[in-house]
Amino acid sequence: MRLRATLGALALRLDGGETPEAVAAAVAEAPEMAIEVEVAGTVDATVVNALLETASARGLEVRFRPPRGERRVFHTKVVDHTLRSGQRVASGGTVVVLGDVNPGAEVVAGGDVIVVGKLRGLAHAGAEGNEQAAIWALELAAKQLRIAGHVAVAPDDAPAPAGPERARVEGGQIVIEPWERK
């Protein structure tokens, strides 16, 4: 266990050999600052409970963060068939569907959603809050699109798509525009 002060919080690194008593004592004696916890090993639940209970009793905020040097690296998931009603595909990265997404099917991606076909089901790009994500389709005919926390619903009298289109967030709302070669 290492406890050190940083600019905005106390950094507490748990390596896995700590006891609940040692962690509780360290938190009880720490300055009144938020505690940022890095779990770098296998830590027993009793250690985490002791940390949270002691911090709560002192009114200290506790934040957990991934170990240093570790980043989530997402890959592109390729679906090589049409998605039928009731089917759902989800990925933390980009999802590419080589086929159609039929009504009742769902595609959820942390990155972009790219449909090489007709998109008539639900597409949610940037599902983890990424407002830079986009939805691309050769025929964008979905009744509902989601990008990050934004939702767009197609009007009942929406015109048929006039070719490939892209949906993205601009000015706090989803906009749909032609997907053209530049």
Image: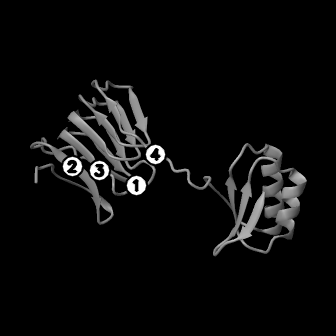
Residue at 37% x, 47% y is 111
Answer left or right for 6 relative to 161: right
| Image location of residue 128, percent across then percent down | 45, 50
Which mark, residue 134? 3
Residue at 86% x, 66% y is 28
Residue 102, quarter of the rendered image: top left
Do the CB atoms of the residues marked 3 and 2 lie less than 8 Å apart? yes
Mark 2 neighbour class, 10 Å CA radius: few under 14, some 14 to 19, many 20 or more: some
- The Cα–Cα distance between marks 3 and 1, rounded to whole angstroms, is 9 Å
- The Cα–Cα distance between marks 2 and 1, rounded to whole angstroms, is 16 Å
Q: Nearer the viewer, mark 4 or mark 2?
A: 4
Residue of label 4: 73
Which mark, residue 130? 1
Nearest to the observer: residue 91 or residue 167 = 91
Mark 4 neighbour class, 10 Å CA radius: few under 14, some 14 to 19, many 20 or more: few
Mark 3 neighbour class, 10 Å CA radius: few under 14, some 14 to 19, many 20 or more: many
- The Cα–Cα distance between marks 3 and 4, rounded to whole angstroms, is 19 Å
Residue type, numbered disc 1: Asn
Do the CB atoms of the residues marked 3 and 4 lie less than 8 Å apart? no
- In the rendered view of the protein, which quadrant contains the N terminus? bottom right
Q: Nearer the viewer, mark 3 or mark 4?
A: 4
Residue type, numbered disc 2: Arg
Residue type, numbered disc 4: Val
Do the CB atoms of the residues marked 2 and 1 lie less than 8 Å apart? no
- The Cα–Cα distance between marks 4 and 2, rounded to whole angstroms, is 25 Å
Give the number of marks. 4
Residue 157, quarter of the rendered image: top left
Element under disc 1: loop
Residue type, numbered disc 3: Ala
Nearest to N terminus: mark 3 or mark 2: 3
- The Cα–Cα distance between marks 4 and 1, rounded to whole angstroms, is 15 Å
Residue of label 2: 166
